[in-house]
Image: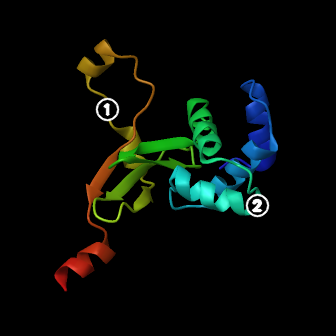
């Protein structure tokens, strides 16, 4: 996770204007560890900046993701989720409640990319996503 100073520097290096709105959106996301949706970030940001629009939050998050300042977690159902942690890691996704949990296991970062993939594509990276049922949802199902 970037500190606010590092975030400001990274924005400037990428030619992005450093605005109060962008800093606020980044700060809110960086303080969360639950992979919030744009709507959840919007609800939190507007407590401090009521005039902000949901469209601004969406556009800002997409801009951050395009410039590798945050990670856009693979679409889960119909809603994108965002992650302020850009260091290599993977995810567990609950297919019922949509909970996302980080996985940090160096073995997953050492997978061999098949030769056929490397011949067809210039591979820039990868993320592994495991899908299943979290303990809370599993407990509710067994009742």
Mark 2 surroundings within 10 Å by alpha-carbon count, few (fewer than 14), some (14 through 19), many (20 or more) = few
Residue 138's spot in the image, x, y percent?
A: 24, 75
> Tag 2, which secondary structure?
helix
Residue 112 shows which numbered tag? Answer: 1
Using residue 20 as the reference point, say whether residue 1 is left or right of it: left
Q: Residue at x 41, y 59 (%)?
A: 100
**How many angstroms separate mark 2 from mark 1 (CA)?**
46 Å
What colouring style does the render use? rainbow
Residue drawn where x is 71% and y is 49% of the image: 52
Give me the residue at 34% from left, 65% from top: 97
Reading the image, the residue beneath label 2 is 48
Count of numbered labels shown in the rendering: 2
For the C terminus, the quadrant is bottom left
Outermost residue on the bottom side: it is 143
Mark 2 or mark 1, whichever is nearer to me? 2
- Indicate the quadrant where residue 99 lies: bottom left
């Amino acid at each position: 996770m970037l500190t606010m100073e590092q975030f400001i520097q990274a924005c400037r290096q990428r030619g992005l204007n450093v605005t109060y709105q962008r800093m606020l959106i980044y700060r809110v996301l960086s303080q969360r560890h639950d992979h919030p949706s744009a709507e959840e970030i919007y609800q939190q940001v507007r407590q401090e900046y009521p005039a902000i629009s949901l469209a601004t939050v969406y556009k800002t998050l997409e801009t951050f993701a395009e410039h590798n300042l945050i990670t856009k977690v693979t679409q889960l159902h119909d809603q994108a989720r965002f992650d302020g942690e850009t260091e290599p890691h993977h995810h567990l996704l609950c297919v019922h409640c949509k909970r996302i949990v980080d996985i940090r296991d160096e073995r997953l970062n050492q997978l061999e990319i098949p030769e056929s993939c490397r011949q067809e594509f210039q591979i820039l990276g990868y993320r592994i996503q495991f899908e299943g049922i979290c303990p809370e949802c599993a407990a509710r199902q067994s009742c």
